[in-house]
Amino acid sequence: MPQPLNSKDASLFRQVVRHYENKQHKKGIKTAEQILKKNPNHGDTLAMKALIMSNMGQQEEAFVLAKEALKNDMKSHICWHVYGLLYRAEKNYEEAIKAYRFALRIEPESQPIQRDLALLQMQMRDYQGYIQSRKTMLQARPGFRQNWTALAIAHHLSGDLEEAEKVLTTYEETLKIPPPTSDMEHSEAVLYKNTIMAEAGKVEQALEHLEKFGHRISDVLAVMELKADYLLRLDRKAEAEAAYTALLDRNPENSLYYDALIRAKGIASDDHKTQKAVYDSWVEKNPRGDAPRRIPLDFLEGDDFKQAADVYLQRMLKKGVPSLFANIKSLYSNPAKRDTVQELVEGYVATTSAEGQSDADKTDFLSSSYYFLAQHYNYSLSRDLSKAMANVDKAIELSPKAVEYQLTKARIWKHYGNLEKAAEEMEKARQLDEKDRHINSKAAKYQLRNNENDKGLDNMSKFTRNETVGGALGDLHEMQCVWYLTEDGEAYLRQKKLGLALKRFHAVYNIFDTWQEDQFDFHSFSLRKGMIRAYVDMVRWEDRLREHPFYTRMAVSAIKSYILLHDQPDLAHGPLPNGSADDDNERKKAVKKAKKEQQRLEKLEAEKREARKAASTKNVDGEVKKEDPDPLGNKLVQTQDPLKDATKFLTPLLELSPKSIEAQSLGFEVYLRRGMRKISDQLTKNPGKHALALKCLSAIHAIDASHPTLHVQTLRFRKALDSLSEPLAPQVAEVVNAEFETLLPKGQNLEEWNDSFLSTHKESVSHQQAGLTCRQLLKPDSKPQCEQDLTSTLDSKDITIETALAGLELLNEWGSNQAAKAAYAQKASSKWPEATLFRVD
Amino acid sequence: MVDILPLSSYPSYIDLLPSIQTCNITNLPENYFLKYYLYHALTWPQLSFVAVVRPKHGYTKHTTPTGNSAGSAAEQYPKVVGYVLAKMEEEPTDGVAHGHITSISVMRTHRRLGIAERLMRMSQRAMAECHRAQYVSLHVRVSNTAALHLYRDTLGFQVESVESKYYADGEDAYAMRMDLSNMFIDWAEIERKDRERAARDEKEADEGDEVGEVGKKETDGEKEKERMVRVKVGRGLGVGDLVEKNEAQTA
């Protein structure tokens, strides 16, 4: 039903559209209302009004209005287009695409609708749809280079490299004269085509192409890199050597170039002498560079190594380069090199300090050497913490103002297992240079590690924009400070303040959502800018965005929080004192107290919110920033289904980090619990959860068949199968049993199986911990003996403080009594007297 | 050891952006959304560089075109210890094409290795070669003597002016710049040949459709260009209210 307006109203309608385009929202609404007074059911006007309201942040009202508009005019492409735009604003892309398609059916020639559809198809990676859209757009306007490029991108990303190259070539052939060298769009398009050829494996052709056109391309470095790479791949050694030499002339600090140069020169990997000579020649060319001096230490051995290391270390120590140890430590995987370095630097210290009377240079050299040794003895592969402390104290004595030295002292305390002291010492380091944000960040981090959330935030606030809504914490959210939010959440998790912990983890989760959404504007922007290679790399990166360790770490902690919440639902009300779960009365009292505390905090937070509201709710842009209705995460923690919520974090983790044992073992924990729930408890039936849990186990098995976690989880899975409250569906059971048979055969005597595991892995404490866990599961009456055996693992010479701490956690898991925990903790404390980690409360 | 790598040209290390953002917010008070980094990486991909610790077993992920390879993720994401984020001034007030250092920093633990100098030199050269930037400009805190030393004494920048209260905490900035025209590529020979060829073609009076050039002049093209300013990036999601500041902490 098209709804014609009289000429005056039609002109008003055009004004509405113009106001919208110019972002004059209020004027737009006013004009729309003027039309609606006379034509209250005019669909297009209602739709435009809805669109403007949506842009003003009134999402819900906008949707109501847009639906009304559609009801009034189902045949209007404007109504459907707006409907799609509203869905798009809500990030419901699937519905948006549907609405755009309706709009296009009515108005097939509309460029804006076609473009909006194409952008969403790209965002959703609907490559076939995108190819179709781009073809239509190209037919409509073949004169635009970007329409050709876009179609090529569509083919390229869909995997059709031939077609992509063909499209680019077709366009190039229409160019009668070569575009000027200043035409970046052309320059980039040529390089784009070149990389497609190489990706298709046509290296020879790509090289030829580059040799023909490379001299006209202004991204000189990219051309040089590509050419060198092709030459080396084609084994054209002499030319490759020249190409990498040219690259090194530009940038002598790139180890990849040296690797390639050595290959191009055909130097055998065991011909250290010739290699060293190559590096020496680059030192001569760039006396101030680091790479050619440092790299030979990787391959030299014996006396050659000692000699080279001596020269390198002395030079850097004399210069006082603070990153020397960071630059050296990767050598320590070779124990002989580790010992040589130690011997050398200990020697410098001995000779220099024996020389007595000292000038300034000598003092600097000496303090640098002490500093190096402090880091050396603090490093896991060469650890001797008392030596580390002695050295750092000497370094500090010589240079009391050196931030790095004080920082290292804090790190030594961390390794001692005394987080309190570590935080204190780091705070001292911060005070040595209050204008430096790096040391400020470190101080805050150490406070968080010591579970001092407020102190940490207070330090952070010295460098944040505190006028942001929500103050310093608000700014850290807004500036996407992932490291801080993650550390803050983990500190809350350790304190079992699960609401706040989940709050932070969700915040990081949302930041990743934002990062994914960020690409949207570039689907059109990059076509206009013509920087296609960077755009395509970005699209591919976005597809594996959550593979980043920032995501992995946060997701692991979030899932642990939800598992903890599932196992101890009382934690929804706040942290409870240890041991209160044993006695029902005690438990009720503790929960009541926790609830009270939760209410108190909530009230406090509400008051703060009111105070802020009174002060000002508008930020600089005049936009009203929404206050967070749940700043403490109480709604998150009071979830009906923690395990389902955990799945949201788990799915990307398993998809993008399938090789992570930690991810797979957490997947097992979540799925096993979901599978074990009584049917009556389930909101939905979960027949496949056992199979999913088993899939995780098989994945771990494929990575490391003797992993200690796998051992325990395998047994727990067996016990779960043996004690199902309802049998698995027959088809599921068949698959599960068959697959599990390969991990743990049904006929296997479990105690023998566990004993053999224990005796095979005698030397590893983690494996002993796993074996003992299984033993007390198999034979509950052996628990006291298992507890004693676990305590005895503390005598192992290889045990680290982290593994020892994991042992204490195990006693909690086993439900051991206070006496057993105290015995373990006491023994650990006497082994690590400086540590505060083994306090049992 | 530390390698200096391109951010988003070739090979691409664009997946290091979150780590670069972390490096920035750990070191400096002037911070940006990830989208603002993306905006730099995708508009001037040749100009930004990153300094990373070379992973023990090399850069596995970056050798395959699709970026997929097995192994632990932490190993695949090398540690970022420095970066330079750079751009071309989009609407230069003096009408002269020039580059600008949006942000540069090096982790305190990796100073005095010459990383900042190397990052700067790589970016400057790319500005001159790719974008024919006449000069590069930057701002630096008046109290930051180490950075000032690098820019003025090592690299050859000159102080243009002092910008009063440039930084949010009230500190003044030196506005510095350095001429880059000596690094231009000499296109004269290629351009001369192009001109000759164009003249020849004209003589032959070829009425062929010059798609590329004509297309750019269409009014629709202008419209598209106008829309460019609406792309939302940076703090506050609007590029408009974004004040890029630069703070270098180097030695």
Image: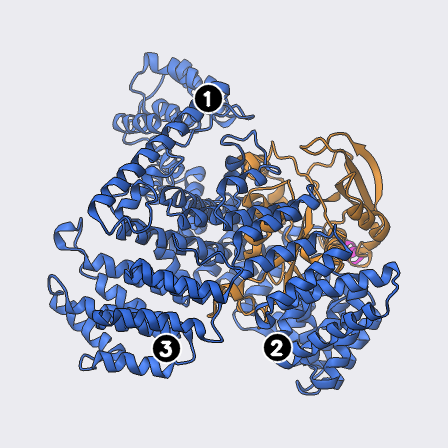
Magenta span: B191-196
Instruction: Please say if B201 is above or below A518.
Output: below
Distance in Å between CA atoms under marks 3 and 2: 39 Å
Q: Residue at x 62, y 66 (%)?
A: A386
Q: Main secondary structure of the magenta part?
A: helix
Q: Is residue B226 magenta?
A: no
| Amino acid bearing label 1 | Ala
Q: Colour of chain B?
A: orange
Query: Which of the labelled discs sits on residue A233, or is there none?
Result: 2
Chain assignment, label 2 = A
> Could you tell me which residue is drawn at 85 percent across and 63 percent down?
A362
Total marks in image: 3
Residues tagged by mark 3 and mark 1 found on one chain of the structure:
yes
Q: Chain of mark 3?
A: A
Mark 3 secondary-structure assignment: loop
Q: Is residue B241 above or below residue A778?
A: above
Crowding around mark 2 (Cα neighbors within 10 Å: few <14, some 14 to 19, many 20+) is some
Report the mark closest to the observer, 2 or 1: 1
Visible in this render: residue B1?
Answer: no
Which sits earlier in the primary sequence, circle 2 or circle 1? 2
